[in-house]
Every structure is written in structure tokens, then in C-alpha cells.
Amino acid sequence: MELFASNETVSTLEHALSDRTDVASIAMQLELAWYLRQRDSQRALHLCDSIVQVLPSLHIDVKEKNQTQARVFLIRAENSWLKTDFHHARQELKSALLLFSAIADHQGQADGHWLAAQIETDAGEIQLQQQELAMCMTEAELAQDQIRYEIANACMARHKVLRMRDPDEEQWVRHFESLSTQHNQGLLTWVFDFLGVQAGQYSDFATATTQLIRATEAALNSGQITRAIVISANICYSLAGLRDTEGSLKWGQHALQLARQKDWPISLGISLTQTADAFRKIDQLDSAKELLNEALQTLRKVTESRSYVIALRALADIALAQSEYDNAYHYFKQLQEHPVARFQQDFQCIALRGQSQALLHLNQSSAALESAQTALVIANLNNYPDYQIASLWAIADIFSTYPELCKSASHEGKSSLHFLLQAVEIGEKIQDYAISDKLYARIADEYAKLEDFSNAYAYSLLAFSSREKSLNIDIKISATALQLRLQTEKAVSENEHHKAIVEEQQRRATILEQANETLSVLGTIGQEITTQLQLDNIYQVISHHVNALLDVTHFSIFLLDSTGSILTLTYGMEAGKRLPQHQFSVDDQIYYSSRCIRERREILVDNFETINAAAQLPDTLKMESLLFSPLIVANRIIGVMTMQSRRKRAYGEREQLIFRTLCSYSAIALDNAHAYSQLMDARNQLVDQEKMAALGSLVAGVAHEMNTPIGNSLLIASTISERTKTLSNQIDNQSLKRTELLDYLNNVKEGSKLILNGLTTAATMLSSFKQVAVDRNTEHKRQFNLLTTCQDIAASIRNRITNSGNELQLIIPDDIEMCSYPGPLGQVLTNMIENALLHAFADHSQGHMIIAAERYGNDQIRLQFSDDGNGISEKNIGHIFEPFFSTRFGQGGSGLGLSISYNIITSILHGQLNVKSKEGEGTCFTMLLPIEAPDMKN
């Protein structure tokens, strides 16, 4: 099973489990409990209890039982960890790891070490945490599980970058950016979390916020609720860095709501701390202090955790800001001596500098100076420029308050100005670092005290310039915050716990959100409406969306006739019932629809007292609100659309905007449908004309072919008739000779034979013609022999082929039986033969055409028509199936033959048609046809 599963996977599993009661369902119950361990801890534990109860009686092998029991231990251990019961968590975890190890379950061991790392993180054992993550990665590699490996890798990298400027940092960033296209939500949580934390360390709060929001979404989707709480709290901090106070507070509140629902101490403590920091940044210090005190109280069982350290540091900063110097010193001292802070030099700098500031105000100059200098040493050793500048500034404050320190031997020649200038020097070496205008102003003041007004003026100008740059940066930060706000609006709106601090701002945000969503929905609706080409479909789509978006009891569409003088109700629905068709004149003064056409404008009637009852359609309900809008396309009015409600004033600005947009889309769709209908009528008329022309050509050819055998038969019959009269006269005159009688009998015998052959030929030709003609005219599906059908087709057009001096050869096995449409197939082959006679052999005779067929697989045939004629040029071959494309317009070419053939092959015969040709080397059309064609719907 996965370490973390998506919500969709859990839903599918629950659905599958609901119908299972067999032994196999135990494994599914265990998997579900595993995935619910943070989504629904109580239910997960209940499932574990049920599994443990039946486990001894299950008929499964020992390894599977141990594996199941170990996974139960792991689920229980995670529940204890979430409640900060580290003792029981470690005990359950130890039992799980022992069982996993005994059965060499490397995946299970990886999950055990992963949980152990999370426990040690919250317990403040950072070194143990790193060891557990390393073991998790080792076990994941043995299990060949890349996802688990990368999750542990990202978690380890995240903790290392918190210490700032790790040598592998850039390599990690490149690596995890390459994983950001993965689909596994559990992995993406940690990938985006790492990238967000890393960006935040360099004050790139815009990137940090973007990545952390993506991490939150992935965490919630993969069931990592505790991670989602922590990341939401970090988003609160990042947005505070962007000075987006409202957004910061919202995310802090979101984190708090999630945490309070779960009541997990560490998660709640983190969200309280970050929300307090947001309050601190808007000078709501009392509210911030209240939250921090609650955070420390919540985290009292895990005072060794980093979360406790962060809360402690925030409380110290507030005490300093509120001039509670004794409390501030106490809190900063606790921070310095905290086990977690001892291993993180950035905390040491913060703690020592804070002590220095508190001691300065407590008039303990020596101790204050010692703390500030120690902070500076740590900052120098670790190359922390921000902390170097802050420490130097703190020392300068001390020297400024106690100028006598400058006279001591150890500080001789050093003054407040000396340290301030040193701070500026460090800032100038940092790329893209903006030196504070307050620092420049402070230096200017120091020069002024020394009566060095030239330098004082110079630094005053620098302070002014820095202040101006700072304002520009503020503007950029505000713009970035606004951009992020727009990007994250969807995530915020989908969060059911989202609440605003200020009611007016909340109202505006809600209106903006609704407008964005409405525009998005309207765009989708517009695409759906305008892609329809059948009127009934358009009406159904419009009606569905109007009812979904608006309060509508009555909905109607009226279309103008071709003269533009009559309006017809083509579609109307009222209270779920279809309205009958109704017509009236555009000049009618009663109806609002007529007035809408005449005035070419939208009409809103939203008060029943002003509505003329006669203006409503017969047998319809009385309405309180009526909205009419003309349907306009390219400045042409094609009709009117109306929606009506039984509620007074149902249609405000938002509803009118939606309706107006729907009318625009509907007008385009209706106009397109009308144009499409006209095009289809024209196309069908052309196709019918083409069919009749082809049938007429067929009749003419057959009539010509039958003239010869029938004419010969008539000539012989008339000759025999004359000889018979002569013989009859001779018999009457008794002048008949034996030789004459024998000669007559031989002539009659030979003549009868010739007559019989001629009439047989004509009868065969007539039979072929009848079958081809019937097939062409009916398009009925039937069983037929392909060779016989092709012979009938060839016979029907043999005259044209012979007269043109060309030949047609059939190479078709006699055992291919098809159940398809011989008429359309015959039309295709006839079109191809006539196309070859017109184009391929236009300038010469003695050409050869071949119709060949073979079986293709079990249920298809490959039918080819080829010629050795002129071929098709490269520029024309891509257009030959287009309607009305012909190189011989006015010379017998209509440009429809091959287009109709392509449509018949693909839509009626459900086959494929391809062509290969080279100029001067002939052409070959290849058709892949099913032996049994699907029935035609229409």
C-alpha cells in the first residue's frame, strides 16, 4: 500500500469495501484504516480494533498475520504521536518495526522509520530525526519504492535548509523542481513544501506562498492533515512577509480551524504561533500575546520541539515591543538555552541580540554589549549578513546610549558611528540588498552630532533615496501580493472554513469571486451552445443553463421569419411544460417581444402592477418579473429571448449580465444552425442531382449496349419471317423442293440460335442494370457477393469504357460475401471509373483500370481501384475529397464525385478511404471496408 493515498483512492476503496464481507475484506479494511489515520483517526482505530479481534481466527499464513499486526501497531503509534503521547507512540512503533524486520518487509520498515522521524521532530531530537529519515530512505531503496524514498529525501532537505545555506541546497532545488510534475499527491506535498520553505529562507515570499499553497492542496488531497495545518500556518507567515495582512490572517485562521477540529497539540500550537505573528505585524500586540500564551500552554508537553522555540521567540519579540524588558530578557534567555536553539545558530543570534536590547533598556550596558558582540561573532562565523547588520546596529545603540564606553581602553576609537558605518559596508556587499533608510538617517544624526554637516547631508540624501526605494519595493510587494491573491482565490474560496476579518471586505471578495466563477461558467456554456448545429439541441442546452443559473419559471425563444415581420415561438418552457407554437406580428403593440424587436433593446419589467396582462401569451402563468432581450448577430436581429419569474424584482444587474451573455451566445448558435440547415439542404440537393445524373448516364449506357443484340435479333427475326412467307407460298403452289426446305430449316435453325444468344445477352444486361439501379436508389443493406456486384457494375458502364478505348479488369475472389450496402458501393466504384475516364485518360486511350479485392483480417476487406493514367499532382492530391474541387470544371467535372465517394465510404459503409498517386504514374484508391457494415440510424 502507499504511504499516502489520494481522496479519490480512499473513496473508491470505501465503495469497494461496502459490498465485501469475506476474509479478503480484512486486507481492504487495514488499507482503509491506514489511509484514514489522519483523515479520521477514531474510525481508523475502530477498524484496527475490529481487525485485531478477528485476526487470530483468520486462515492466513504467519507472515501475513504479522504484517497485518505490524501495520495496526503503526496506525496506533501515529495516533499517539498526533496526541503528543510520545512514550506510547515509541512503544507501538518499536513493536511494529520488530514485526516488519522479522518478515523482511522493507516497505513496512520504511513507513516505521518515517513515523519515527516525525515523532523525533516534534520531540526536538533533530539528530535522531535525521537518522530515522536516512534509515527510511535505505529501507525504501531496498523495497524499490521511489516515492517513499523521495518523500523522506524532501523532508530531510527541508529541515536542512532551515539552517540556511546548506552546501547541497542548489542541487536539492534542481532535483525537487524536476519532481514537481509528478502525480503522486503524497510526494508533491513534500516537494512543494521544500521549495516553499527554501524560498522563504531567502525572503522570496511570493515564490514561497505559491509553492506552499500547492503543498497545502496536495496535503489535503493525500490525507496529510497535520502537514496541511503546518503549511497553512507557514503561508500565513509568508503572506505577512508580503504585507498582505488580510490574506495572512485568513490563512492563519484556516490553519487554526483545521487544528481545532483535530485538537492535535503541536499542529494547534504552530497555527496559534503563526496567526499571532500576523497580529503582531499589524500592531495587535495584545491579541498576538494572547494567542502565543495559548500556544505555549498547548505545547507544554513538547517543550523540546522547534514549534515551542518559535512560539517562545515570538513572545519575546512582543514583550520587547511592549517595553516589558524583564519579561523580554527572560524569554530571550530561555530561547538561547533551549536544546533546539543550541544547534541552530540563527536562533542563537536572535536570542543574544534580543537579550542585548532588553538589557540596554534595563541599564545593564556591559551585559548588553557582551550579548550583542557575541551575536555578532556568531553571525560573522556563519556568514549571516542580516544578523551581522542587526547586531552591529544593536552595538551602535549601546554606544550611543553610553558614550563613555568609547573612552575605555578596549573600545578606544570606536563609537556608535563606527558600528553603523560597518553595518552599511556589509549591506553594500550583499547583492540586491536594500539598506534601511532608518540606518542611513541614524548615521546622518551621528554625523550631525559631530558637526560634520557635509556627511550628515550626504547620508540624509541616502536615507531619502532608500526611503523612496523602500516605497517602490512596497508597491512591488503589494502588486505581488495582489497577484498571489488572484492566483489563490480558488483555493481560498473552496476552503469551507474561510472567513473574513472585516465584513465589508468579505462582501466585496465574495462578489468578485462570484463574478469570476460566473464568467468562467458562461465561457464554458458559450462553447457548449455554439458547438451545437441542431436547433433542438441548442434549445435544450440554453434552457438547461438558464434554469441552472437563474430564477426562471417561464423561458421562451421567438424567431423572425424571412420577411422580418412575423415572430414565432419556436421554443417555450413554463413550469416544466412545453408551450405550443404561437405567432404574432412585429408591429403588434401588445407583446413585449414585438416591442423588443422594434426598439432593438433589452426590456425589463419587474413589478406586476406595471405588467399588461394581455401582453402575456395565452394560457400562461402570471409573472412578476419579465426580461426580454433581442437576439442580434452582426447587427441583424434574428429573434427575441425572454425569461420570466413569479418573484418580484428577480433580475438584478448580475442576472441581466448573465442573461445578456447567454443571448449573445444563443444568437450566434441559432444563426449558425440556420446557416447549417440551408447548407445541408443545398448539399442534399446537389447529391441528389449527382445521383440522378449518374443513374441517367447508367441508363443511357445500358440502352446503347442493348441496341446491338436486340437490333441483330430483330433483323434475323424479320429475315426468318420473310423466308417463312415464301415457303408458305411455295407449299400453296406445290412448287416446294426438298433442297429449298432443307435450306430453310438450316436458316431457321441458325437464325433461332442467333436470336436466342442476342436476347440472352440483352436479358443478362437488363438484369444487371435492374439490380444496380435498385441498389443505387434504395441504399438497402443486404447480403451480396462482391465479385458478382462488381461484374454488374462493370457491365452497366462497359459501353463508356469500350468507347473510350480503355480496359477494366476485375481481380476479385469469388468467395467474398458481404453484408453491406451494394448501391452506395456501386456509386463509389462508378464515380472512380468515371473520374478515371475524365481525368486519368483525358489525353489518351488504351489505359488500364483494375478493381482488386482481398480479405484483410477477420472482418474487413481491402478493395482497390487503380489506373495507369495521368496521376494527380502533389498540390492537388490534398484537395481531391473536398466538395466542388475539380480541375475540369466546364469540361464534365462537377467536383462532387470523390467528395460523395469519401462520405459514402466513411459514413454509410463505415470504412476508410486513402489515395496514393504520382504525376504521370497513375493513381490507386484503397478502401478498407467492414464485411458487415453497421445499420444506418437514419
Image: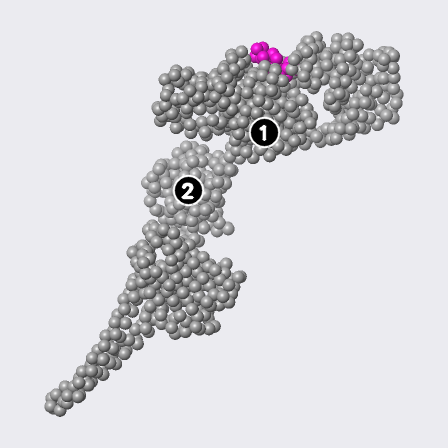
Tell me the crowding category of disc 2: few under 14, some 14 to 19, or many 20 or more residues within 10 angstroms, Cα based.
Answer: some
In x, y percent, where is residue 156?
61, 24
Report x, y in % for residue 450. 87, 19
Amino acid residing under circle 1 = Phe
**Label located before the other in sequence (1 or 2):** 1
Mark 1: which secondary structure?
A: helix
Query: Is residue 274 positioned above or below 622 on the image?
Result: above
Q: Which colour assignment does the render follow?
A: one colour
Q: CA distance from mark 1 to mark 2?
A: 41 Å
Residue 541 - label: 2
Residue 504 seen in render: no
Q: Which residue is mark 1?
A: 192
Amino acid type shown at disc 2? Val
Query: Residue 615's x, y, as percent?
Result: 38, 42
Q: Secondary structure at mark 2?
A: helix
Disc number placed over residue 75 in the picture, else none: none
Quarter of the figure with residue 182: top right
Q: Residues within 10 Å of mark 1 (few under 14, many from 20)?
A: many
Image quadrant in which you'd find residue 215: top right
Q: Which residues are magenta?
A: 295-313
